[in-house]
């Protein structure tokens, strides 16, 4: 999936391992930080701020503040797309954002599509949210290339599969 357009634009996003509990080794974290501060092989890449985060526990990354229409949350059981306009999705989002000490490993929800009891960790937030213990935060990114190229570079450095969490704040 291509998030960058043909013309240069600025976006905010987080890069996180697909394994939500994975925290790359300290050396790899240092190398990815150095890389994004000066990516010589991506000359058109720039960002205003770059931070590497290691969270003490599993954390929900909120990429959506209610103003941008996050499309859907995917059900892991029946694979239905649950519209985020549904009250269920809005309440889930608010609970994940507001609850400081929520035990995400134990937090369960009943999906509105098929009434299945699933872990919140199994839900697919379609790129606008997600869970992680480690992430690279990139703010006001300007880049003309593809996000696949960017993720592939970070993947090589960190040694793990990665996903991109878009940030849409107003």
Image (cartoon, rainbow, N blue to C red):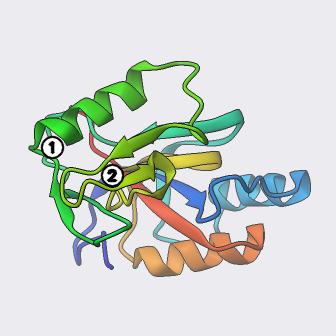
Residue 47 in the figure: left or right of residue 57: left
Residue sitting farthest toward the left: 85
Residue drawn 71% across the image and 72% down it: 160
Residue drawn 31% across the image and 77% down it: 2
Numbered disc 2: secondary structure: loop
From the viewer's side, name the closer residue of 42 and 54. 54
From the viewer's side, name the closer residue of 84 and 61. 84
Residue at the spot of label 1: 68
- Would you identify the image quadrant in which residue 154 lies? bottom right
- Residue 128 numbered mark, or none: 2
Q: Determine crowd level at label 1: few under 14, some 14-19, many 20+ residues with C-alpha closer than 10 A.
A: few
Residue 103 position in % (x across, y down): 60, 31
Residue 125 position in % (x across, y down): 34, 55
Q: Does residue 42 appear in this view?
A: no
Q: Determine crowd level at label 2: few under 14, some 14-19, many 20+ residues with C-alpha closer than 10 A.
A: many
- Would you identify the image quadrant in which residue 8 lies? bottom left
Residue 127 in the figure: left or right of residue 20: left
From the viewer's side, name the closer residue of 140 and 168. 168
Q: CA distance from mark 2 to mark 1?
A: 10 Å
Quadrant of the rendering where the N terminus is positioned: bottom left
Residue drawn 27% across the image and 43% down it: 168
- Would you identify the image quadrant in which residue 104 lies? top right
Quadrant of the rendering where the C terminus is positioned: top left
From the viewer's side, name the closer residue of 15 and 140. 15
Residue 152 position in % (x across, y down): 59, 79
**Pointer 2 and pointer 1: residues touching (CB < 8 Å)?**
yes
N-term-proximal mark, 2 vs 1: 1
Residue drawn 43% across the image and 53% down it: 118
Q: Is residue 134 above or below residue 161?
A: above
Numbered disc 1: secondary structure: loop
Q: Does residue 162 appear in this view?
A: yes
């Amino acid at each position: 999936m291509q998030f960058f357009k043909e013309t240069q634009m600025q976006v905010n996003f987080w890069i996180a391992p697909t394994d939500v509990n994975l925290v790359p080794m300290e050396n790899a974290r240092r190398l990815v930080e150095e890389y994004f501060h000066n990516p010589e092989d991506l000359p058109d890449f720039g960002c205003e701020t770059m931070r590497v985060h290691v969270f003490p526990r599993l954390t929900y990354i909120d990429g959506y503040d209610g103003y941008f229409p996050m499309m859907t949350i995917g059900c892991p059981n029946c694979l239905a797309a649950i519209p985020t306009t549904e009250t269920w999705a809005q309440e889930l989002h608010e609970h994940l954002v507001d609850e400081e000490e929520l035990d995400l490993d134990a937090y369960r929800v009943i999906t509105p599509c098929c009434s299945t009891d699933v872990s919140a960790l199994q839900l697919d937030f379609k790129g606008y949210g997600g869970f992680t213990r480690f992430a690279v935060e990139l703010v006001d990114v300007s880049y003309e290339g593809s996000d696949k190229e960017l993720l592939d570079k970070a993947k090589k450095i960190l040694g793990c599969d990665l996903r991109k969490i878009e940030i849409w704040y107003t």
